[in-house]
Amino acid sequence: MSFELHREKFPCRISEVEIGAGVAGNGQRFLQVGGASTLPFLSFDGPSGHLPVIGMEVWDVVPELWPAPLENIFGPVAGDPVEWARHCAQEWGAEFICLRLRGADPELNDASPEACATLARDVLDATGVPLVVLGCGNDAKDNVVLQKVSETCAGRRCLIGPVTSDNYRTIAAAAMVNGHLVIAQSPVDVNMQKQICVLLNDLGVPQTQIVMDPTTGGLGYGLEYTYSVMERVRLAALQGESSLALPMIVFCGFEAWRAKEAKTGPTDGVVQGVAWEALTAGTLLQAGADMVVMLHPEATRVVREHVKALAGGEMTL
């Protein structure tokens, strides 16, 4: 008796998004994400789109109170964001760089919009890989800083944000005019994720210039709820909710290393912290993440191998 595999078909697919402005001869790379018409890695059900891409996070200031495993790795370059980014791209295999402009915060360094924009451009030029730029979290300052970043890096197709339903017009308009993409962020809520995406569409931002950030929690700190929301977002998109038919980005490294459990262990937290970050990323990949932002190089390598194995290759640990 022959066995017939049941295939689950969906009527819609996730939009394809291109990040980075790589063209022949300019030395810049670009990435394509999205395009799936089935749930993650279930290629027997249909086209699974582009494989998830793995990037690494860089700060514009020396991080304070980071756990020893991260300080030991990044210490020599933490004071030079451009060199830090170059290490991530050239030595640790980051497919894109995520630049967090923490120093722009008025309560920290209050870095000027011009300085932030120049740094973003320098990172782009030094690494040759696509760039994600995050603001400091202060809405008023982010509106000015990210607008300047958009102008200075015009045409480079950076992914800029985040934007929320309370603060999106200035950043989204600047990104759209200068040829960038925007991160549509919601507080772990399907309806609010749909709301910000609809607002961006109404503003004129096309689907091909939006990536969703559903907001994530690390292992042991809301990961299960994050997973369920991301899964519901992806299922709704595949079943016809066009406003949610967009790739998703998750910031696994930042969230995972905030957990106290990631910082403890028999070897100063290195093994446990790497495992904590890698497990967070692996879980969110299964939930539908298309772009994963990591911190520790070893966790980055493990997750890259994990994606390779899920895609049908062999995993090397």
Image: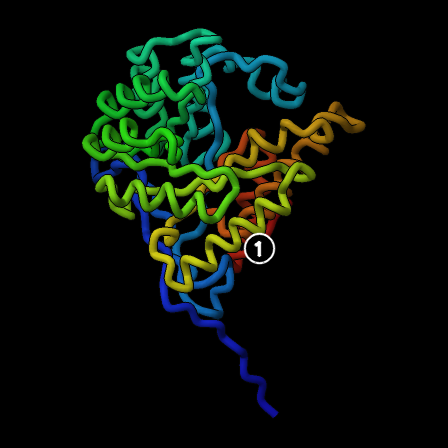
Picture layout, residue 312 above or below residue 246: below
Residue drawn at the location 35% of the way across and 52% of the way down: 243
Q: Position of residue 273 (x, y in %)?
A: 68, 31
**Are there few (<14), some (14-19), or many (20+) residues within 10 Å of tag 1?**
few
Picture layout, residue 135 above or below residue 226: above
The residue sitting at the left extreme is 177
Residue drawn at the location 44% of the way across and 58% of the way down: 236
Return the residue nearer the eye: 116 or 311.
Answer: 116
Q: Which residue is mark 1?
A: 314
Which image quadrant is residue 106 in?
top left
Q: Which secondary structure, mark 1?
A: loop
Residue type highlighted by circle 1: Glu
Q: Is residue 147 left or right of residue 79?
A: left
Q: How is the image coloured?
A: rainbow
Residue drawn at the location 43% of the way across and 29% of the way down: 98
Picture layout, residue 260 above or below residue 30: above
Which image quadrant is residue 268 in?
top right
Q: Position of residue 144 (x, y in %)?
A: 30, 17
Q: Is residue 137 left or right of residue 115?
A: right
Q: Position of residue 84 (x, y in %)?
A: 46, 20
Q: Position of residue 239 (x, y in %)?
A: 41, 64
Picture layout, residue 193 above or below residue 57: below
Return the residue nearer the eye: 290 or 244.
Answer: 244
Q: Is residue 269 left or right of residue 81?
A: right
Return the residue nearer the eye: 186 or 84.
Answer: 186
